[in-house]
Image (cartoon, rainbow, N blue to C red):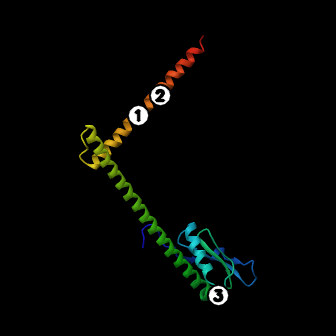
């Protein structure tokens, strides 16, 4: 199981929220509490699995405040609805685990690509410096630190120049107003 996704399970029947159904007077609206609030992807997978199968005893269903809410006859809960919901929950959990694993692998690949690009740039910088008479950096790590420090100094100098230019223009404008 992936560390990025925690399975969602049905943990309780919330009796305090059980009400009469609006569908029919013999039906009830039940709230099955989940161990945590599902995200939109989990909910999408849950509904996707449910829509892939046809069940005769299905009525209204929605997910609200960390609960699966549904209309049913009380006699059908254990025989039809709970196994049906558990199957959909397992499917949604499996799909979310796959999605989390795929995202983790993509993130690792992006980080690896960035490291490779930094190394390529450091080697290129070393070649350019060696051709220009500047001694090459001894390692890619040192080259990266040098580039970072040099980038900071260059940006700082650029901002100083901009500030001085803006200050000089401001002083010129204030001098013109005193004529």
User: In the rendered structure, which disc, 1 or 3, sits on the residue that comes first in sequence?
Assistant: 3
**Residue 131, horizontal then vertical, whole percent:** 27, 41
Q: Which residue is rendered at x = 59% and y = 12% of the image?
A: 178
- Cα separation, mark 1 vs mark 2, equals 11 Å
Residue 151 visible to the viewer = yes
**Residue 154, horizontal then vertical, whole percent:** 39, 35
Local SS, label 3: helix
Q: Horizontal placement of 171 versus 134: left or right?
A: right
Local SS, label 1: helix
**Residue 165, horizontal then vertical, whole percent:** 48, 25
Mark nearer the viewer, 1 or 3: 1
Return the residue at label 1: 156
Is residue 144 shown above or below 30?
Answer: above
Specify the quadrant that holds the C terminus.
top right
Q: Which residue is rendered at x = 59% and y = 75% of the image?
A: 48
Q: Residue furthest top?
A: 179
| Residue 170 position by quadrant | top right
Local SS, label 2: helix
- Cα separation, mark 3 vs mark 2, equals 75 Å
Q: Mark 1 and 2 residues: CB-CB less than 8 Å, in contact?
A: no
User: 109 or 37: which is nearer to us?
Assistant: 109
Q: Which numbered tag is attached to residue 163?
A: 2
Is residue 132 shown above or below 18?
Answer: above
Q: Which residue is rendered at x = 56% and y = 77% of the image?
A: 12
Mark nearer the viewer, 3 or 2: 2
| Residue 159 position by quadrant | top left
User: In the rendered structure, which disc, 1 or 2, sits on the residue that comes first in sequence?
Assistant: 1
**Residue 31, horizontal then vertical, whole percent:** 63, 75
Is residue 135 shown above or below 105?
Answer: above
Return the residue at label 3: 76
Q: Residues within 10 Å of mark 1 (few under 14, many from 20)?
A: few
């Amino acid at each position: 199981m992936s560390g990025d996704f925690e399975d969602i399970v049905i943990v309780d029947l919330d009796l305090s929220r059980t009400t009469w159904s609006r569908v029919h007077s013999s039906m009830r609206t039940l709230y099955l509490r989940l161990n945590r609030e599902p995200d939109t992807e989990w909910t999408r997978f849950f509904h996707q699995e449910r829509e892939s199968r046809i069940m005769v005893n299905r009525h209204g269903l929605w997910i609200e405040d960390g609960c699966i809410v549904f209309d049913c006859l009380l006699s059908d809960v254990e025989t039809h609805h709970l196994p049906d919901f558990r199957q959909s929950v397992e499917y949604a959990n499996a799909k979310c685990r796959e999605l989390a694993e795929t995202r983790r692998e993509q993130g690792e690949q992006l980080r690896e690509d960035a490291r490779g690009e930094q190394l390529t740039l450091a080697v290129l910088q070393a070649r350019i410096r060696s051709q220009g008479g500047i001694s090459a950096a001894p390692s890619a790590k040192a080259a990266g630190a040098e580039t970072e420090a040099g980038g900071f100094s260059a940006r700082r100098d650029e901002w100083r120049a901009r500030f001085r230019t803006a200050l000089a223009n401001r002083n010129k404008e204030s001098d013109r107003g005193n004529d």
